[in-house]
Every structure is written in C-alpha cells, then in structure tokens.
Image (cartoon, helix red, strand yellow):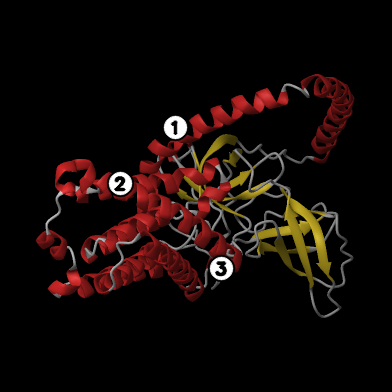
Amino acid sequence: MTPWLVIVLLLGNFILMAFDARQIDSGQRVIRVWTQTIADFVQSPVTTLSSSISGYFGSIANLRSAQSENDALKQKVQELQVELKQKDDLSDENARLKALLGLRQQSKINVLPARIIGRDPSIWFDSSIIDKGSLDGVKLNMPVVTDGGLVGRVTAVGPLTSQVDMLTRDKSGVGGVIGEIGVSNALGVVSGTSKRDVIEMRYVAGSFDVQPGQVVYTTGQDGIYPPGLKIGEIVEVISGSATTPHRIFIRPSAGLTSMQEVAVLLYEPPAKSEFEQKLPNAVKK
Amino acid sequence: MDNLKITIALIVAVLLQWTLRNIAEPLGYIDFPLIIVVYAALQRDAIKAVLFGTFAGVAVDALSGGLLGANGFSKTLVAFVVSEIARRVYMDNVLLRIPVIAGASLLDDMVFYGLHRLFGQEPTAPVVATISYSLIATTIAGTIIFLLLDFILSERVRKPKREMFPTRRQTRRRNPIRLGK
C-alpha cells in the first residue's frame, strides 16, 4: 500500500511542477492564490505585531541620536526647499515648452502603497507577499517599486494579497538603458544572476563606453515596466569588443532584502499593434 | 489523540514557516515542516508521514517563488526514506535521531535544488551556503523540537502511574523488528 501511495504522491507533485514550470511566466496559479488568501489571516497579524514590537524598541534606541539628527534634518529641509523651487521652475518651463510643441503630457501612473506581510517561506527564493490584491486593483505583471527603484513584478494575485517576484530571479527580464532614454543608446536586457545583490545587463554592444557608477533605467520596451524607472547602478563591467557585447553587473537600487513598504504601479502597458501580435514569437495579449 | 497532536504540530510548523522569515531572515533556514514530517516518519507510520510530507511541502510551495510541488516531492521522498529506515533500525534514542534530521535536511535540500535545475529554474540563493546553513539550523531546531514533542506526546504526561511498573510484555510489543512488521 505505502509504496503505491508514495509513487502516486510523487507523480502528483511532479505533474504539478511540470505544469508550474510551463506556466511560470504567464497565467495565474489557483493553488497559490487561495493559499495566499488563507495565509493572509496569519501573516498580517504577525507582521503587524512584530513590526510594532521592533518599532517600539527601535524608537527607544533611536532616541539618543534624535537631537543631532533633528538639527541635520532641519538643515536638509532648507536645502531641499531651495532645490524644490528650482525644480518647480523647470517643470513649469517644461510644460510650457511641451505645450508649444503640441505634445500631450502623458497621464501619470497611479501608485498603490503596499506593505510586505510575508517573505518566501523557502530560503532558496526571494519572492514576497504584499497586503494588496485584486480588490485593490492589482493585476498580474504590474510593476512594484520602492523609493529607491524597481523591485520586480506581480506574479500571482489573490483577492487580498499578491505575490511579487524580484528582479534578482534568474527568469526575470527587464528592458534597460544605461543613462537617460533619448540621450543614450546603450540598450540591453537586465536579468537575475541567481545572486541576491547583483543583476546582469546583457546584449549591450561592446562599442559603447560603459563605466561603473553609471545608472540603468527601464526602457518600457518590454511591455511590462514603464520607461524611466531606476533599476540600479553599475558595479562591474567585463568589457566586450566590436563583435562581442559587454557583460555588465548592476546592484539594484531598491533595498530588496530589507524593504518593508513598496508601491504597486497600476500601470498597464499600451496594447500591441496588430502587426506585432501576428509576429510568430509575440506574446498574444 | 497522538495523531491529532502531530497534525496540529504540522499546521503550526507550516504557519511558522510562512511567517518567521519576515521577522528575522536567519529563521528562514529552519525547515519546520520537515522536522515534523521526520518526527512522524520516525513513529513508523509511513502513510501518515508521506501524506504529511506532501501537504506540508505544497503548503510551503504555494507561497514560495519556486516550483509548485518541488517541496512536496522532496518531503514526500524524505518521509518515505526515513520511515523505511525507522522500520529497520531502532531509533528511539535522541542521539540517533540527530544524524537522521541532518540527513533528512540534506536529502530534502538536494532533491529540491535538483528538481529546480531539472526544470530550468535557478534558485537565487547560493547552493553550498544555503544547504549548509539549512542543515545546521534544521538539525539544532529539530533536536529541540523532537525533545519537546516527546515530552508532549509521552505516556508519562498522560499516565504517570503506568510508567512506574512497565511490564516485560508491553516493552517487547514496542519493538517492531521482533514482530516482523
């Protein structure tokens, strides 16, 4: 009896894996969605309790440095006010120039703040569970960011919670550009390296001059992420040649391991043209 | 009654696995469901152990970024292997259980990693470091949890008087090798 039961269970798990591996980049996994919903009833109270306890002790520890920090912050606020005024002037000027050129200003992307209520229970991966789901307007593949930069995308959506896969996952892929779009043509694909703190940018032509310290932004050409989001800073470059591309290693600017709050960008990429949808390798959506 | 207690322990283990990593990252290295699955397997009830393995594994996989079913597969396999060993070798001693937990953790991690490689999914964690930390953390935590579960499930708690006068016949019945199970 037991060996047969073991064989049936192992086979069942194997089929689940095969199905999941096939559907990993698209589609919704029902078991995950419902487990997330059940887990939310445990994870949310535990996270609230632990964060309030750590916050209480943290505030006691921080009280000592509060005075000097307060003085430094006041000075910083004054500096930022001057900077903000300059930026307002530039923004006004930009709006006037755009109006003159007859360009329509792009609609702003709505941002939904969310809290991380759970991390990957398996130590092998780094996905996170956030406390916003389809009832809040979250949809599959929506980008997730912090104030530092891009975090990843939503890979499973339940009614109350969603699962977020990080940039560091080896199957992730983001269209990236070194420097600002329009200024630089150093385009490539940013993907995970199976390391927690480094991601790699591939396919950047070896003829481009790339230096550590340069910043990489999204291009918006991948059909998931909007353009202009900060991905990270280049930390290492293995130079290519005229015929081989550079290998560029980037440190993600969002603190992926320590973040507690994130924001979901309620962004839906523009629909693909009829011609693009007819291409043999195109994703049909 | 013991079955109910172990089932409750398994549910608690899954809940701990879901929540503890968000509180402190190093706690993620402890595989709580595996500890309970191994404990159930050591009770020589293979059917219960493999069912526990599948349930706990899929419950962990469902919230993980890894493949759905990978933990279920590895834990089911571990449960079967441990229960088969427990049927043939006397393992009621705490010291003998330590290498069993360590071996189970090693086998579980290696099968889990191998399955992901087989399906072309590279985990984000460094392999050797993760397996090593997981082995150490799970073995230490497992030993403590086993002692705790032994205390909760032992007859001493329920029937203190019977323990004082154990009969020879009852002692022999507890040995499965002689009965040829």
Q: Is mark 2 on a helix, strand or loop?
A: helix
Discs 2 and 1 lie in a common subunit: no
- Residue at the spot of label 3: B122
> Is A207 above or below relative to A155?
below
Discs 3 and 1 lie in a common subunit: no
Residue sitting at x 66%, y 24%: A59
Residue sitting at x 55%, y 36%: A114
- Residue at the spot of label 1: A45
- Residue at the spot of label 2: B151
Which subunit holds the residue at mark 2?
B
Q: What residue type is labelled 3?
A: Glu
The image shows a total of numbered marks equal to 3
**Residue B82's mark?**
none
Left or right: residue A196 versus residue B119 is right
> Is B70 above or below relative to B143?
below
Q: For mark 1, does the 10 Å Cα neighbourhood hold few (<14), some (14 to 19), or many (20 or more) residues?
A: few
Contact (Cβ within 8 Å) of mark 3 with mark 1: no
> Is A89 above or below relative to A200?
above
Q: What residue type is labelled 1?
A: Pro
